[in-house]
Image: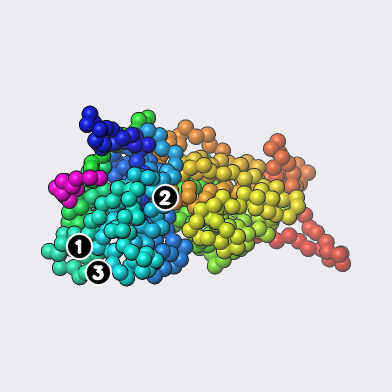
Amino acid sequence: MATAVVDEAGKRQSPLSDAVVVRFAGDSGDGMQLTGGQFTLSSALAGNDFATFPDFPAEIRAPQGTLFGVSAFQINFGSSAIDTAGDAPDVLVAMNPAALKTNVPSLKQGGLIIADEGEFNDRNLAKAKYGANPLDDGSLAKWQLLKLNISQLTMDAVKPFGLGNKEALRCKNMWTLGLALWMFDRDRAPLVDWLNAKFAKAPDLAAANIAALNAGHAYGETAELAGPLKQHHVDPAPAAPGLYRTLTGAEGIALGLVAGAQLAKLPMFFGGYPITPASAILHHLSRLKEYDVTTFQAEDEIAAICSAIGASYGGSLGVTSSSGPGIALKGEAMGLAIMTELPLVIVNSQRGGPSTGLPTKTEQSDLYQAVYGRNGDAPMPVISARSPGDAFECAIEAVRIAVQYMTPVILLTDGYIANAAEPWAVPDLTTYEAFPVKFLTEVPEGGFKPYGRDENLKRPWVKPGHAGAAPPDRRDREGTRHRPYQL
C-alpha cells in the first residue's frame, strides 16, 4: 500500500510506495491489453514484483464506446512480495466515458483518475449513459482528477508522419504508456526497441508510435502541473539471484507439460479445440515442436480428447485442454480413459457460468464437476494450480501421476491464472527427478495380462503391434471367436 507523506506545513507530498495498483481501461480497440503488457515488461525490468489481471469483454467487439465494450488491464507492482493483482486501483487511466463509468467504482477513495477529456463528447457520454459530463459536474470529487486531451496531444505528436486521424488515434495508448513510464520512473529504451521490432516492416508506424511514447513521457516531465501528477519511484523487490522471466498461467501449463514429457522420456501429443481461456495453451505448445510436441486442432471437443486418448494408446503422452462447456463434452471420453487405464492429462482453464457460460469471466466453477462429474467407478486425480508459477510445477506433477499410475489426471486452472502474469525464476531442470516410462517389451511368464498389476497397482503400458502382447481372443454371445486387432 502507498503511504502518504505530510510535510511540516501539513501539505500532502508524493507517497512512498511499497506497492501501487494501476488499471488501464478503454475501448476494445484502444490497445489496453498491449499497454498493460508493455507496462508489465517495464515493471519486470525495474525489478519490481508484480501480478496482473487482463479483463476484456465477452462480447465479440461490442459497439465502440459502449459499456459492454470496455477492456481493462490491471497491474499490482511493488518493492515487496506481490500475491494478487489487487482489489482497488490507486490509479485509473480512463480512455473514454464508458471506461470511467465501469471502473471508477473500484478506485480507492482519494485515488487518481487520468481521463482523456477529448473522448468525453456528447455522443460518447450518451453511449455510456451519462446525463452530464462527469469530468465537470463534481461527481468525481472524492478522487483526484487529471483531465488531459490525450487524443489531441497524440495527434499533435504524430502529425509529422502524415497519418490519417484514425491511424493517429491508434497511437493514444503509446502516449498514455509514455506518461505512465514517467510517473513511475521507468526507462523507455526497451519499449522503443520493442516498437522498432514490432513495426520492422512499417518504419513510419514505428516512428509515429515512438513519437507518441516520447511525447507522453515529455508531457509528464515538462507540464509541471500542480496537484496529483507527480513522479513515484518504486524500488526493486528483493529476489534471489537467478534468471527471471514474465510468465502467464497458460505459459506455465505449456512449459510444465513439455518439461513433464521430457522427464518421462515421452513424445507429447496435444489435441485441443479453441475455447476461451484455454486456447492460449494450444498457441504456446504449437511453438514448441522442437521438443517432440505434436499439436492438433480438432473439429470439436470430443474429437480432441479422443485423439489424445489414441495417442496415449500408441505410446505418447496424450494431453487435451478445454474450459467449462468443453470439459462437459469430454465427460464420456474421460470415462473411456479411466476404463482403459491410459495416461492422459486434461487441463481445465475454468471460466464462469453453466453451459456456454461467460467466456472471459473467471470463476473456479468446475471443482465438483472435476471431482464428481462422471459415472460411477470412475475416480480420477485432480490437481489445482494456485499461480502462474505454480502451474508449471502442477503440470509436471500431473504428467508424473498420469504415467506412473496409468490414469487420466485433471489439472485445474482458471481464467485469472491463465491470463495473469508474474515474475518467475526459471528453474534448473537438472534438479528435477526424471520418471522415465517403461513399456512392456517382453511377454511375461504365463502370457500377457492387460490388467496385470505391478507394485504401484498399475497395468502394463504396451505399444500396439508388440508381438505376444495382444489381449486374448474373445467370443460373442453366439460363440463366434473374435481376434483382437493387432498391427
Indicate which disc, 3 or 2, sits on the residue closer to the N terminus: 2
Residue reaching furthest right?
A: 478
For the question of whether residue 1 can be seen, the reply is yes
Indicate which disc, 3 or 1, sits on the residue closer to the N terminus: 1
Estimate the spatial distance between the alpha carbons at disc 2 and disc 1, rounded to whole Å.
Answer: 28 Å
Location of residue 401 in the rendering, given as x and y in whole percent from the top left corner:
61, 42
Circle 2 residue = 106
Foreground label between 3 and 2: 2
Tell me the residue at 62%/45% (across/down).
Answer: 382
Tell me the residue at 48%/42% (across/down).
Answer: 387
| The image quarter in which residue 479 lies | bottom right
Indicate which disc, 2 or 1, sits on the residue closer to the N terminus: 2
Tell me the residue at 30%/69% (across/down).
Answer: 122
Quadrant where the N terminus sits is top left
Helix, strand or loop at mark 3 = helix
Estimate the spatial distance between the alpha carbons at disc 3 and disc 2, rounded to whole Å.
Answer: 31 Å
Q: Is residue 184 magenta?
A: no
Question: Residue 140 or 459: which is nearer the viewer?
Answer: 140
Circle 1 residue = 152
Amino acid type, callout 1: Gln
Please give the label number shown on residue 394. none
Q: Main secondary structure of the magenta part?
A: loop
Tell me the residue at 31%/42% (across/down).
Answer: 43
Helix, strand or loop at mark 2 = helix
Amino acid type, callout 2: Ser
Quadrant where the C terminus sits is bottom right
| The image quarter in which residue 486 lies | bottom right
Circle 3 residue = 166
- The magenta region covers 219-228
Q: What's the image's color scheme?
A: rainbow
Helix, strand or loop at mark 1 = helix
